Amino acid sequence: MIIDTVRFGKIEIEDDRIFEFTLPVIGFNNLKKFVILDLNKDSFFKWLQSVEDPALAFPIMSIFNMNVDYSVDLSDNVVEALKITNVESVLVMNIASIPQDNPQGTTINLLAPIVFNLDEKLAGQVILSGSGYDISFPLFKNN
């Protein structure tokens, strides 16, 4: 399948790389199909590109690659919605906000990670209620 994106141009992806969001990205309830784009193998960042809206792509990263104390406890409802049966099939990514004029001011949303079930190709954004995590955790200490 070829998707025509605003940010990256035309990209060919295999159908089996598309995730169905059974728990929508907050504010984008009508969009259900996304793909993870890994365009720069040397970067911590990947892109969560909507298959349905060519203009929508979120920079994402795994906070587990950083030295941050972070854990994700999923409710039974989330486990059921994403059909999670095996913890090894779970990938957790966090949406980044990267200011164009100040990349050192990048923040990561720890409160509402994107959880992927790699086996079932299901995903969703999950709010970690009561966790105390921030939606604007600074990626760099001195910004």
Image (cartoon, rainbow, N blue to C red):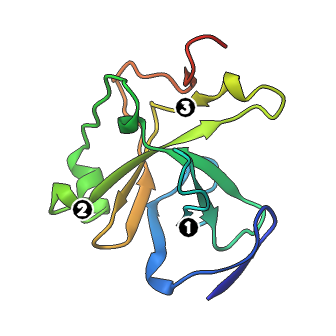
Q: Amino acid at mark 3?
A: Ile
Comes first in the chain, label 2 or label 1:
1
Q: Residue furthest front?
A: 42
Q: Give the secondary structure at mark 1.
A: strand
Whether label 2 touches label 3, CB < 8 Å: no
* Label 2 crowd (10 A; few <14 / some 14-19 / many >=20): few
* Label 3 crowd (10 A; few <14 / some 14-19 / many >=20): many
In the displayed structure, 17 sits above or below 22; it is: below
Foreground disc of the pair 1, 3 = 3
Residue name at image x 30 percent, y 73 percent: 120
Comes first in the chain, label 1 or label 3:
1
Q: Residue furthest top?
A: 142
Is 94 placed left or right of 5 in the picture?
A: left
> Does any portion of residue 18 appear in the rendered image?
yes
Measure how far apart labels 2 and 1 are at the Cα level.
17 Å
Residue name at image x 41 percent, y 44 percent: 126
Label 2 belongs to which residue?
89
Measure how far apart labels 1 and 3 are at the Cα level.
19 Å
Residue 101 in which image quadrant: top right
Is 132 placed left or right of 27 in the picture?
A: left
Q: Position of residue 10 (x, y in %)?
A: 75, 78
* Label 1 crowd (10 A; few <14 / some 14-19 / many >=20): many
Q: Nearer the viewer, residue 129 or 88?
A: 88
